[in-house]
Amino acid sequence: MLLYIYQKNVIIFLNTPLFFIFVIIIKTEKLKKAVGFLIVLLIITQSGMSQIAHYSQFYSTPMTIAPSFAGLTEASRLSFNYRDQWPAVPGVFRTYSFGADHYFSRANSGVGFLVLRDVAGEGNLGLTEAGMLYSYKIKIGQKRGSKNSEWFLRPGIHFKYSQRSVDFEKLTFADQLHGDAPISVEAPPLAKKAYIDFAASLLGYTDLYWGGFAVDHLLRPNQSLYGLDSRLNMKLSVFGGAKILLKPQKNKRVRYSREEESVTFAVNYQYWDKFDQLDIGAYWTHDPLILGAWFRGIPVIDSQDKTFNNIDAIIVLVGFKLSPNFKIGYSYDMTIIRNLFSHTGGAHEISLVYEFNKTKSFYKHTIIPCPVF
């Protein structure tokens, strides 16, 4: 990350994990509009370089992590997530997603549907994705006489249709800034670029522990809006966690009662196109309240400038169960990159989760013990 300050103008080149953003914070309206051009130019002309949407509340929308999480509640579930990143920066950096999944107990299968929309910059550089997910639960072992020691594997696949887009008319180019011509001579890119993509994952879990990995962009689709060869590189995710029960359960064979009090630790590591990112944190659950704290970044000192260049944010979260079936969560990212917090406004995120069709199997120990926010 590079930060320059010149006569109250702040120029930031942020090359953080999974993000490649060029932002200028200034007061001149024309230059604010030029931000859109710079973002588009940097993103769509670099081979495999683009923003990949990521949530701080990643376990409130687990299907964005891995398709193995489809049907994880062993019931029916609807979820909506909204993220507003860096609201103080000119331009829009927002992500929306809607997911629905259901578990078919007779087929040991989970099926899900996920729609995601991401918009970045003054030129509304957008990504729209819609896809189907499938997972299959396989029992691989059980300690004799102990139901709570069952182990399961859950492979998953995700087929999706994606579309890149940009609003060329909202961009301002150099020849418009320095001349009187209202129309730029720059050749416009394609308004939209569509492609098919594919992801796969594998999850292993018991009633208190889980871990797995996912590989996205397996087809390495070409996303260029200029007809160039700009293929997405494959993205690797490794995730896991553990739940520690703090309050004895009335029924030891069922660990998901309403009186549950627990602390859940979770980690999510992602590597993509020479960039990596680590989310690590914990949730305290005392039904109906959930409180959490997270750290995003990799605390390794750069060997050249002796600084922590791969540090992003501290995240705080509060969740509340409004009813047995409906939960809401809010989180805030406090940017800890040098001198950047006051210029970006952090990031706000809201999640809504509704679960229904809960049968007796919903309360069994076989449910993946992931946090709900």
Image (spheres, helix red, strand yellow):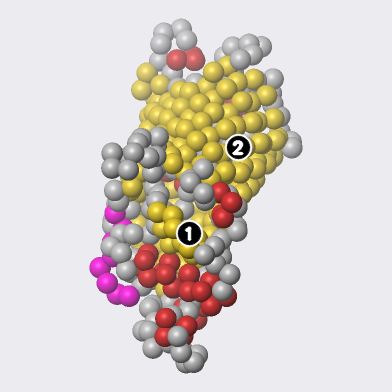
- At 39% from the left edge and 88% from the top edge, which residue is drawn? 185
- At 57% from the left edge and 44% from the top edge, which residue is drawn? 333
Q: Nearer the viewer, mark 1 or mark 2?
A: 1
Spot occupied by residue 114 in the image (x, y as percentages of width and height):
50, 52
Q: Nearer the viewer, residue 26 or 300?
A: 26
Checking the image for residue 5, the label placed there is: 1
- SS label for mark 1: strand
Residue 44 falls left or right of residue 285 = left
- N-term mark: 1 or 2: 1
In reply to whether residue 231 is colored magenta, the answer given is: yes
Q: Residue furthest bottom?
A: 181
Residue 46 falls left or right of residue 203 = left
- At 44% from the left edge and 55% from the top edge, which residue is drawn? 3
In reply to whether residue 107 is colored magenta, the answer given is: no
Amino acid type for the residue under numbered disc 1: Ile
Spot occupied by residue 365 in the image (x, y as percentages of width and height):
53, 21
- At 53% from the left edge and 71% from the top edge, which residue is drawn? 32
Q: Which residues are magenta?
A: 226-234
Q: Mark 2 sits on what residue?
A: 316
Say if residue 56 shows up in the picture.
yes
Amino acid type for the residue under numbered disc 2: Val
Residue 343 position by quadrant:
bottom right
User: Does 212 appear above or below 313?
Assistant: above
Q: Residues within 10 Å of mark 1 (few under 14, many from 20)?
A: few
Say if residue 238 shows up in the picture.
no
- SS label for mark 2: strand
Checking the image for residue 176, the label placed there is: none
Spot occupied by residue 14 in the image (x, y as percentages of width and height):
42, 54
Residue 214 position by quadrant:
top left
